Image: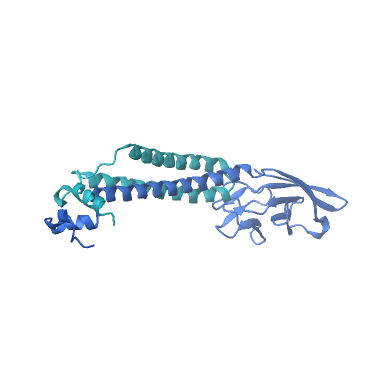
Amino acid sequence: MSNEGIPELSNRSRQERWNVEFPYGWDADDLVSRRQLLRFAVMVSGALFAGTALLAGVGLARERKTVKEQAIISADEVPPGGVHYFNYPEEDSFAVLLHLEEGGFVAYNGICTHLACHVYWNEEHGELACPCHEGHFDPATGAPIAGPPNRPLPLITLREEDGMLYAMEEIPR
Amino acid sequence: MNEERHIRLARDTPGRELRRHSPGQSVIVGLGLAIGILLMGMQLWLLTLAFDLYLSDEPWEIVVLAGISGLVFIGGLLMLRLLDRAPHRRGR
């Protein structure tokens, strides 16, 4: 911008002329940017809080107990010491049915209570194991016996009728 | 260009020697920034912890984490409100 024709500028220093070209106070500019930064930080903080609260809400709203009768398998198809994996209570759920050596059937939700990996029957050691973080569960009770899990596997109650095993309900513990 | 307005603003703009923070102001601002970043880092950590607890199906512990995260957020809002109520000072 030319200063010609503006008598007031003719006697001014270079710094003063620059102030005319760029007429924004140094402090004012500084304050605005800080405040914008603070607003942005508070927005991020709010988003992080919203995410945590959402997880809490979804966790609380999740169904804790599922009652649903479903045929699993014929009892004589699983020999003592044998295992059968099935989907219960939903199609994409994962559950484990065990025929204990000492007799009797037990079934558990097959999702590890540590960080939700699938557990499997380790025949060599005679226990349910989670491969992700080396969690181990007692096959008779579903209780954790080693590794990071500290809660037992959810129990699935069973009913036997005419040689067929039925899952009745899943009970979180 | 609105030259008259610019000339007026130029008169109001202080010289370089006046455009300095008061003693200690930079330290206070830096300290506030560091505390803010630390608190947001803590919130991020709480969120990852909440994911862990969600996967291990412990919702009541997530509620506690959400409460702590909410307190940090409310603190930020209060700070913003406090600064918005303080007058903008120019050309000290």
Dividing the picture into quarters, in which one does residue A64 lie? top right
Q: What percent of the width, then of the height, locates residue A133?
A: 55, 57
As drawn, A168 above or below A17: above
Q: What percent of the width, then of the height, locates residue A49?
A: 48, 45
Q: What percent of the width, then of the height, locates residue A3?
A: 19, 60
**Colour basis:** by chain
Relative placement, left or right, of B36 versus B62 is left
Q: Residue at x 65, y 62 (%)?
A: A124
Q: Residue at x 21, y 63 (%)?
A: A2
Q: Quadrant of the N terminus of chain B?
A: bottom left
**Which chain is displayed in cyan in the rendered image?**
B
- State whether residue A24 appears in this view: no
Q: Quadrant of the C terminus of chain B?
A: top left
What colour do you see for chain A? blue
Relative placement, left or right, of A43 versus A102 is left
As drawn, A79 above or below B69: below
Relative placement, left or right, of A12 versus B81 is left
Q: Nearer the viewer, residue B73 or B38?
A: B73
Residue found farthest to the front: A5
- State whether residue A152 appears in this view: yes
Q: Nearer the viewer, residue B80 or A137?
A: B80
Q: What percent of the width, then of the height, locates residue A129?
A: 62, 57
Q: Nearer the viewer, residue B16 or B75?
A: B16
Relative placement, left or right, of A126 versus B53 is right
Q: Nearer the viewer, residue A66 or A159?
A: A66
